[in-house]
Image (cartoon, rainbow, N blue to C red):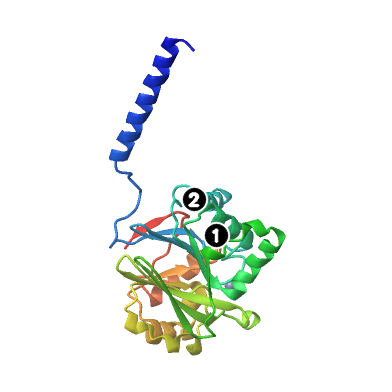
Amino acid sequence: MNRTFITILLLFAAVQLSAQDMQADVPVIMPQPPAGRLEVTYIANSGFLLSSGPTRVLIDALYFDGDIWESPSKKIQKAIISGDIPFKNITHMLASHYHADHFDAALTSRFLVNNPGAMLITTAQTDSLLQKVYRQDPELKRPKQTRIIQTPMFGTETYESGDLKVKCLMQRHMGKDDFKVLNMGFLVGMGGKKILHIGDAGWTEENFAGFNLPAENIDIAFIHYWFLLDCEGRQIIENYIKPKKIVVTHIPYDDLRRNYKRIKEYYPDVEVFLNHLEKKIY
Ligand SMILES: [Zn+2]
């Protein structure tokens, strides 16, 4: 090895070191909304991303094909799984129930592998689909990243981590055909806001009366389309939820124009996200 080559090598090492020093001094700028401000991004159907400071929570947002319901595009699915922008540093994934327009076990298992800092919160029923994936490929198992809520029907269990508090509400899915489907409502506290996401909960008194939700002063309730169009559903909202703002979820494609106006008759301030990745700040 000649002397000139050694000098070049040493110079190169010095430049590398000083570049590292400079990097250490420069603060890493992350595209996060500051705490105290809640950013809501629409994914598809009932799927949303809630962000406040470092807390970034996906709800019902990762699934493959929702059949007649809106689904995240392949590009969005891939970005969520890989943790690419705008889905970098997701801290939590909440899944209300296992239906294919809210959850997909294979995609979720890949998400957990690629995002070791993320925690999945869901029911044992939804987790049983993940267990099927793990039986095929045990290396995908991530038990430390999964919090299974075991509370009985109409019970609650609270999960806390940093700024985030999630009160899980065990409920029945809407409709007679899905009577046995466990649906978990989520009362999320983050960024100084209270958010309720009810998944596909039925609009029955037994599903809501026991939770004393009016005392929670809910800022935003994510409520599905049928709940808002049904007379009983509207009474449940008035008596048992009392949110300051409502965001409509699970809107059928074709009916959007016709029934969105009908919902507006009852709730003039209701909010609708029409485009995937559309953002609103609260
Ligand atoms: Zn469902």
Residue 227 visible here: yes
Q: Residue 238 appears in which quarter of the rendering?
A: bottom left
Mark linked to residue 83: 2
Viewer-proximal residue among 20 and 214: 20
Q: Position of residue 223 (x, y in %)?
A: 45, 73
Mark linked to residue 62: 1
> What distance separates the C-alpha of mark 1 from that of mark 2?
12 Å
Mark linked to residue 18: none
* Disc 2 secondary structure class: loop
Q: Quadrant of ligand 1?
A: bottom right
Viewer-proximal residue among 165 and 101: 165
Earlier in the chain: of badge 1 and badge 2, it is 1
Q: Is residue 60 left or right of residue 246?
A: right
Quarter of the figure that contains the C terminus: bottom left
Q: Position of residue 7 (x, y in %)?
A: 39, 15
Which residue does the image show at 34% across and 76% down from the upper left? 218
Q: Is residue 39 above or below residue 149?
A: above
